[in-house]
Structures are given as C-alpha cells and as structure tokens.
Image (cartoon, rainbow, N blue to C red):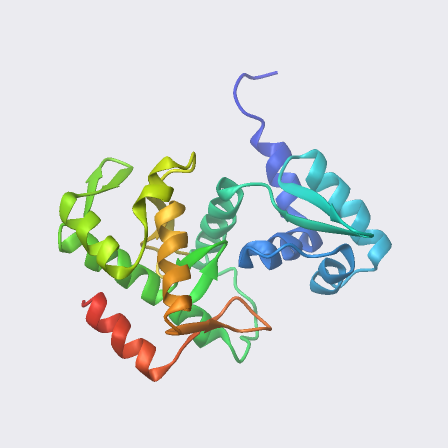
Amino acid sequence: MREGPDIARVATLIGDPARANMLTALMTGKALTASELAAEAGVTVQTASTHLAKLLDGELLQMRKQGRHKYFALAHADVAATIEALMGLAAGQGATRTRTGPKDAQMRQARVCYNHLAGQMGVQMFTSMRDRNFIWERGEDLGLTPQGETFVTGFGVALDGLTAARAPLCRRCLDWSERRTHLAGSLGRAMLAQMEALAWVRRDKGSRALLFSQAGQRAFTAAFPN
C-alpha cells in the first residue's frame, strides 16, 4: 500500500450521487433529519439511513439527538470547503446540470456556503476588504490588519469573542461559481450574521440563495465597494 492519505476512500463517499446531494443540502449550515435528507437525495428514508451511516463512519458528518429526532450536519468547515471546491472543479469541466433551476442566478449572486457569504457578493466583500488593506495575505494565510479590525468593529462585529475561539478568524474558501476567494472562518460567519441582523439579507427557504433587499444591496455596495 502506498503511503499518504486515502483520498480514494473520501472520494468514494462523496462521489455517490445520493450522498453528494445530501452533503450539498447541508451546505446551508443547518442540521437536517434523515427524512429531509432523503427528500433532497431522492431516495427512501431507509436508503438514506444507510448512506448517512457511511458518511458518519467516514467522519464527514456529525449527528446529534434532540428529543426523538436525530439531526445531521457537516462534521466541520473543511468538509464544506471541499464540497465547494469540488463544485468549482465540476463547473470548470462542464459537469453541470443539463437544466438550470429558477434560482440559479440568485445562487450565483449570493448564497450561504456552510455559514458564510458566497457567490458574487461574497467575492466582492473579500476583494474589497483586501484591496483596502483590511485583510493581509501571506501565502494561504489571512488575517485582519489594524485598519481591518477598526472596520469590522465599526460594522458591528465583536472581535473579542472571535479571536478567543478555536476556529480560525479568517479562512480562504474557493467560490465554485466565481472561482475566486471568498471569506470563511469565524469572521466570515460573523459578517453574514451581522448582515442578517441589519436586515440587509434573508435566507431563501428552498435553497442556499441569500436574498438581499434593495436597501440591503445599496448598504452592501457602500460598505464593500468594488
């Protein structure tokens, strides 16, 4: 056996169409039940349970109980980043659906990627912050500059709690539709949460799309100019 990580095992888990649909459905960051995931995958609940057991065993999912129900979620942010990167790879090779859905344009403009803003507006936010020297880059590492800390605090995000957390403050995430970086990490999550708190944006109930109001779009453009 050759040395190194067993990528074939992980690829096999993700590569099954039903399991891929389940993992993609969990990119909203919400935990879902087996029956909800069965509907997303187009399989029976019994079949879904078999797939979920494999994903749990492969440590791609986590499960928690609440009352009589079991809820499933992505195991951690690395799983979400991998799914997003694979979607970008598939799109780049032309491996897309033959029929686009009515919300595809909305998804490309703004969507939730696990717990942060993605799509055109996610890339715009990252690029604007980087170009104004709010974010520093060293190779693959990211961080906030002093100017960035002032901006983020003024935006309404409490940095003390974020920097004390174990999760990285800033992380790159390769946007599947734009094929450019958007901001992940605890800061990416907090920035989206603040936009929701300001009522700039709301989540679409039937997809990962994020729907900005007209006022929210104007405020976003003012905060994150091109």
Residue placed most toward the observer, 90 or 52: 52
Q: Is residue 135 above or below residue 105?
A: above
**Viewer-nearest residue: 125 or 88:** 125
Measuring from the top left, give residue 36's x and y in whole percent.
73, 62
Q: Residue furthest bottom?
A: 214
Residue at the image position 61 percent from the left and 36 percent from the top: 10
Residue lying at 64% horizontally and 33% vertically, measured from the top left = 9
| Location of the N terminus (image quadrant) | top right
Q: Position of residue 128 (x, y in %)?
A: 20, 59
The residue closer to the viewer here, 100 or 155, is 155
Residue at x 33% of width, y 66% of height: 120
The answer to whether 105 appears left or right of 14 in the picture is: left
Residue located farthest toward the right when viewing the structure as drawn: 46
The answer to whether residue 134 of the structure is visible from this angle is no
**Residue at 83% in and 57% down:** 45
Residue 4 position, x and y percent, is 52, 20
Q: Quadrant of residue 141?
A: top left
- Location of residue 67 in the rendering, given as x and y in whole percent from the top left corner: 79, 51
State how many labels appear. 0
The answer to whether residue 201 is above or below residue 29 is below
Q: Quadrant of the C terminus?
A: bottom left
On the question of residue 189 being in view, the answer is yes
What is the quadrant of residue 175 in the picture?
Answer: bottom left
